[in-house]
Amino acid sequence: MVEIRDFSITDTEYVIAIADEQLGEGYVTADDLDGKNVIVAEDVDGKRVVGFCIAYIDSVDGKAYVKTVAVAQEYSVRGIGTALVAKAVDYLKGLGAKQIFSPLWKHDGVINSDVIFRRNGFVPKREIPDYWLNDSIEKGYSCPVCGKVCHCVCVMYGEEG
Ligand SMILES: CC(C)(COP(=O)(O)OP(=O)(O)OC[C@H]1O[C@@H](n2cnc3c(N)ncnc32)[C@H](O)[C@@H]1OP(=O)(O)O)[C@@H](O)C(=O)NCCC(=O)NCCS
């Protein structure tokens, strides 16, 4: 059985392993996981974390974002990604967010997480080229597609309406 719950510090290595595999090495670091803004999915029988989602309200623009979601390959297509986003939306609404955005990764014309966001009431709003470029250089992470310097396109999704 898979349970959705708040992150605890002992989940760090599992979350980083999933992120390295699914999002690129170094994209998520322990520093990204020190707040209350991380939700995890745990396989309670296997006692391991199998997915996570990061959500926050940006201190600069004041907007609410579901920043990232990833599920371990062997647990995919079981509804875990959809459930993580739903919980992240609840969390942000609980903080008073009126409208929530999510920068989704487009690769070869495909947005992997399109389905899970649409199921949570999101639609694409606009495309932003080189969205992760500065971040990839500053943080030095490795994009699974581009390597060290990321030129991937982001499609900014937002809640419908
Ligand atoms: C995208 C991701 C989070 C989905 O998690 P999940 O637990 O498999 O999602 P769910 O089971 O809730 O929903 C699965 C649906 O998404 C679709 N989906 C999952 N992975 C997909 C992919 N790589 N490409 C296209 N669609 C995909 C499935 O077709 C499925 O639809 P269906 O139920 O109609 O068959 C997971 O595959 C992942 O971690 N991918 C790599 C990281 C990534 O791209 N994250 C998003 C960054 S913005």
Image (cartoon, rainbow, N blue to C red):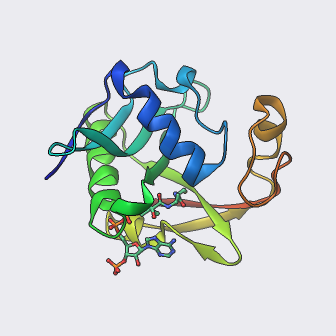
How far from the left and from the top, in percent, is residue 25? 67, 42
| Vertical comparison of 57 with 124: above or below | above
Compare residues 161 and 21 and report the one nearer the observer.
Answer: 21
How far from the left and from the top, in percent, is residue 31? 56, 20
Image quadrant assignment for residue 141: top right
How far from the left and from the top, in percent, is residue 125? 57, 66
Residue occupying image coordinates x 46% and y 29%:
13
- On screen, residue 63 versus residue 45, left or right, reads right
Residue 151 seen in render = yes
| Vertical comparison of 139 with 41: above or below | above
| Vertical comparison of 58 with 54: above or below | above
Q: How many marks?
A: 0
| Vertical comparison of 157 with 48: above or below | below
Query: Ligand 1 falls in which quarter?
Result: bottom left
Compare residues 143 and 10 and report the one nearer the observer.
Answer: 10
Residue occupying image coordinates x 84% and y 36%:
137
- What residue occupies the far bottom of the structure in this picture? 109
Image quarter of the C terminus: bottom left
How far from the left and from the top, in percent, is residue 56? 45, 33
Image quadrant assignment for residue 121: bottom left
Residue 67 seen in render = no
